[in-house]
Image (tube, rainbow, N blue to C red):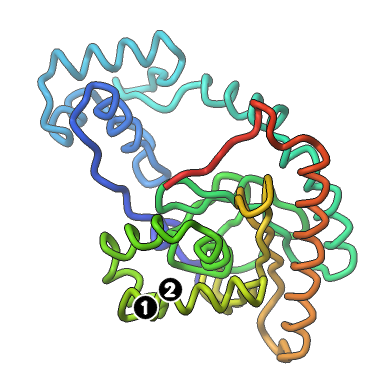
Amino acid sequence: MEKTKESAIEPKRSARPSSSASKVLQLLDLFTLETPVWTAEALVRKLGMGQATIYRYIGDLQDAGFLAAAAGGGYVLGPRFIVFDREIRLADPLLQVAPQIMRDVGQRVGGTQLLCSFYGTTVVTIHQEGQQPSHGVSLERGRQWPLFRGSPSRILLAHMPVSSLRALFIEHADEIRAAGLGDSWPSFHDHLKALRRAGYSIAKDEINVGSAGASSPIFREPGVITGCLCLFVPSKDLRPEELDTLAETAVEAGKRITERLQQFGARNQAFPSARL
């Protein structure tokens, strides 16, 4: 089976206000797997900013380690991001309590276990256990996809505040309809309420062709979702009762992670709070 290109599931990047900080972030957003190297001239053309401004931004980002010079006069993302990634891995309470539970689950059900969080309208893998799928796209730490696609996205949506969901529907109604989540605000809301009552979400061949996923919520405190656990297994020849069992396993493991997380003291300052 031909592998799905990573760009096919990249979330849509939202427009930002034109402050200096947002322009720097807009510049950094251009560095992707498809376009990892940019010259100053190409950035000027792409962003429509003055050459002096671009060179000033590049200089500041280089000095801080966020950009590094590459061969041929271009620039790539710099090592400062690696430092930040290490700090997140060591400081995030969720990454202190979830991996062992994920490994325990993997020994029982096999497949791939993902720990996911979100920002804006993007879901991102923050930890992976188990086997990397032999087909489709990679699912390792840093993999991202839109908030309206796949079982992790749906269970995260199901536990967001109603005011946030209403704002999402106003801004992303076409994407929500295309994802089969509802043709109107009442139907979208009802769909998510049903998932919330069920306590899990299941999907086949959405994030990864050839895989089925069952996702359950993780709460940093009662009623406040911080992420989700998703169990992926091959979807070929998967019987409905096996998918039901996978969902039950995901719910049980999600509750164990939540309990450990709240015992850990999830209200401490190191705990990240996802936001739209």
* Residue at which label 2 appears: 189
Mark 1, residues whose alpha carbon is within 10 Å: few (<14), some, or many (≥20)? few
Which amino acid type is shown beneath numbered disc 1?
Pro
The vertical placement of 13 against 89, above or below, is below
Q: Where's residue 112, x and y in %?
A: 72, 62
The vertical placement of 225 against 193, above or below, is above
The vertical placement of 242 against 140, above or below, is below
Q: Tell me the quarter of the picture where residue 246 sits.
A: bottom right
Q: Is residue 243 visible?
A: yes
Mark 2, residues whose alpha carbon is within 10 Å: few (<14), some, or many (≥20)? some
Image quarter where the N terminus lies is: bottom right
Decide if residue 19 is on the left or right side of residue 254.
Answer: left
- 3D distance between C-alphas at marks 2 and 1: 5 Å
Whether tag 2 and tag 1 are in contact, CB under 8 A, the answer is: yes
Q: Secondary structure at mark 2?
A: helix
Residue positioned 50% across, 73% down in the render: 192
Front in this rendered view, residue 165 or 209: 165
Which amino acid type is shown beneath numbered disc 2?
His
* Residue at which label 1 appears: 186
